[in-house]
Image: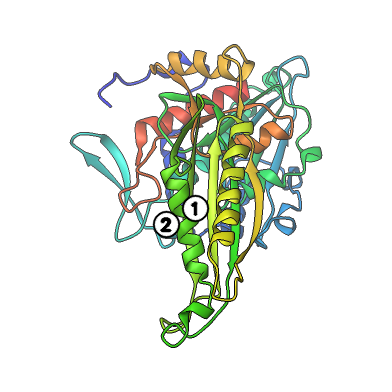
Amino acid sequence: MNRPPVQSSLLSHSIDEQAALDRFLRLTQIPGRSGQEAGVAEAIREMLREGGVDPTQLIGDGAGGRTRLAGDCDNLILTLPGDPQQPRTLLSAHLDTVPICVGCQPEVVEDPERGRIVVARGPTGLGADDRAGCAVLVTAVCERLRLLSVEPGRAGQVPPAVIAFLIQEEIGLEGARHLDVSKIGPVDRGFNFDGGTMDGIRHGAIGGERMKITVHGHASHAGVAPEKGVSAVTIAGLAIAQLHQQGWLGKVQQGGHEGTANVGVIQGGEATNVVTPEVTLRAEARSHDAAFRSEIVTQIRDAFQSAAGQVRDSQGRCGAVEFESHVDYEAFALAGDHPSVAAATERLRLLGHEPACKLANGGLDANWLFRHGVEAVTLGCGQAAIHTVDEHLLVPHFLDACRLATDFLLN
């Protein structure tokens, strides 16, 4: 944070820094957890109209009616015309925040170690993930229109672009998953603005799969005749212990492959004097190797099925397992010379950063964009300690993200 201030001449256009920060402060005060982003979307519509966007250019794509959680708005898409000889550029960010951020009251403060930051007053998260990304996109569009209003001759020289504000990222990338790609069109380079600082370019991300496991046993009186019951809790415990002992939970390293697995939720039982007849578990598996992720899921399924056959009552009855899984997002990785990677690297260096390419171990909207044929890198906007009450925004990084996004829309 002690690096020299960036000279605006390093890039082609100087932005209105106070207007950019004001947009963030305005957006982060609006409640907008996953599925309830309509207020945020409306504020963005208003900001874009104030910046000169024709309201008819802003369209929804119907995604809110296709997501697993019924939402109150759709992905918001803006198309900007430009020189067809230049690369068509996508900028994206997500509208929603996690529940801990509802009720945020942001405040700009000077921190002796981190410089100028934005924090939340009171016991909430800040919601910079990803209201900062939304403010970056709005600022880039408004700055492009501001320049073209004073230099109308440049209108035919800027690249064509599409801007996407995506819903329900925090609950499984649902907005990106159900994006109507026909409203996006062909894209030559893509930049997804999400959490983190400006020092990393996430050119790929891990794949993730979620599981629902329902274990069926047989009820009986736990004090009078426990031998006549089959405990679903015992089956689940036996399966989890086996997976742990064999190295298929936590950080998984098997045969030169790596991934992670976790049983995160166990629900079931109503009384201690009843042998529990049913429990439901929710689990996940992740890996950058899709085949290995599938192997982790197979091992989890086999462990539960094996355990169900091992736990029997006095009549010889055993338990049973229902196993469901679905892929949240597939892994991907862009090459180091991909146009999105190259453009981000060049500009970040001009802004005084030395970016490193990284593979993300969490899912990103870029995972589903990739599946839709849109190859994007993910860049931070200065967000730190996200999803906690200690979340804060590093203002110099946020403003650099605004400069970066603006340059993508101008060059």
Residue at point 55% right, 68% down? 312
Residue at point 18% right, 36% down? 112
Mark 2 residue type: Cys
Residue in front for this viewpoint, 217 or 208:
217
Residue in front for this viewpoint, 101 or 12:
101
- Residue on which disc 1 sits: 97
Q: Is residue 325 left or right of residue 352?
A: right
Q: Name, please, the residue furthest toward the left.
A: 112
Q: Position of residue 216 (x, y in %)?
A: 60, 69
Q: Which quadrant of the rendered structure holds the N terminus?
A: top left
Spatial CA distance of label 2 from label 1 is 7 Å
Q: Position of residue 19 (x, y in %)?
A: 46, 40
Q: Is residue 189 left or right of residue 312?
A: right
Establish if 126 lies above or below 21.
below
Figure quadrant of residue 382:
top left
Mark 2 neighbour density, 10 Å: few (under 14) some (14–19) many (20 or more): many
Can I make out residue 92 in this image? no
Q: Is residue 89 left or right of residue 360?
A: right
Residue at point 77% right, 44% down? 180
Q: State if disc 1 and disc 2 touch (CB < 8 Å).
A: yes
- Residue on which disc 2 sits: 101
Mark 1 residue type: Thr
